[in-house]
Image (tube, rainbow, N blue to C red):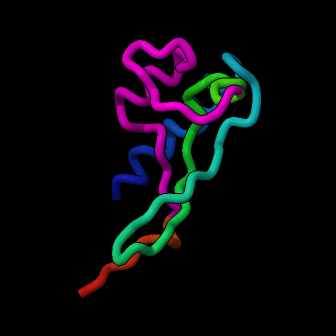
Amino acid sequence: MLLLFAWPIVPVVAFLIWCEDGSPILYRQVRVGLAGRPFELLKFRSMTKQAEAAGAQWAQKDDVRVTRTGKVIRKLRFDELPRSSTYCVVI
């Protein structure tokens, strides 16, 4: 149900990211879920392309690597798009 409301926003966010910093717009991130099972998460790119050129680092408050669009989508928690195939209910 939530996806129906969020779906119209997806192309707008993608266009804003592309206008501000070009492509790629999305990237994949592997996380660890229930029972240590890894799952893949699609994320909108909220940092500049060269954000981790010197190696991975934790984001700081007011990080200069975060784009203007990235600040908004992070604040609204709209930067992460879990793949529907990774969801399962364990009873």
Identify whether 80 is placed above or below 86: above
- Report the side of 22 relative to 78 (left or right): right
- Which residue ends up furthest to the left in the rendered image? 91
Q: Is residue 57 magenta?
A: yes
Q: What residue is at 53 percent from the left and 12 percent from the top?
A: 64
| Residue 19 placement (x, y as % from top left) | 70, 19
- Report the side of 50 relative to 73 (left or right): right
Which secondary structure is most common in the magenta stretch?
A: loop
Provide the residue span drawn in magenta: 54-83
Q: What residue is at 55 percent from the left and 58 percent from the top?
A: 30
The quarter of the displayed image where residue 62 is located: top left
- Which residue ends up furthest to the right in the rendered image? 23
Q: What residue is at 46 percent from the left and 31 percent from the top?
A: 58
| Residue 74 placement (x, y as % from top left) | 41, 30
Question: Quarter holding the C terminus?
Answer: bottom left
Q: Is residue 49 magenta?
A: no
Identify whether 74 is placed above or below 5: above
Q: Nearer the viewer, residue 5 or 88?
A: 88
Q: Nearer the viewer, residue 90 or 35?
A: 35
Identify whether 39 is placed above or below 54: below
Question: Quarter holding the N terminus?
Answer: bottom left
Q: Nearer the viewer, residue 3 or 49?
A: 49
The quarter of the displayed image where residue 52 is located: top right
Q: What residue is at 39 percent from the left and 67 percent from the top?
A: 33
| Residue 23 placement (x, y as % from top left) | 76, 31
The quarter of the displayed image where residue 11 is located: top right
| Residue 22 placement (x, y as % from top left) | 75, 24
- Which residue ends up furthest to the front in the rendered image? 54
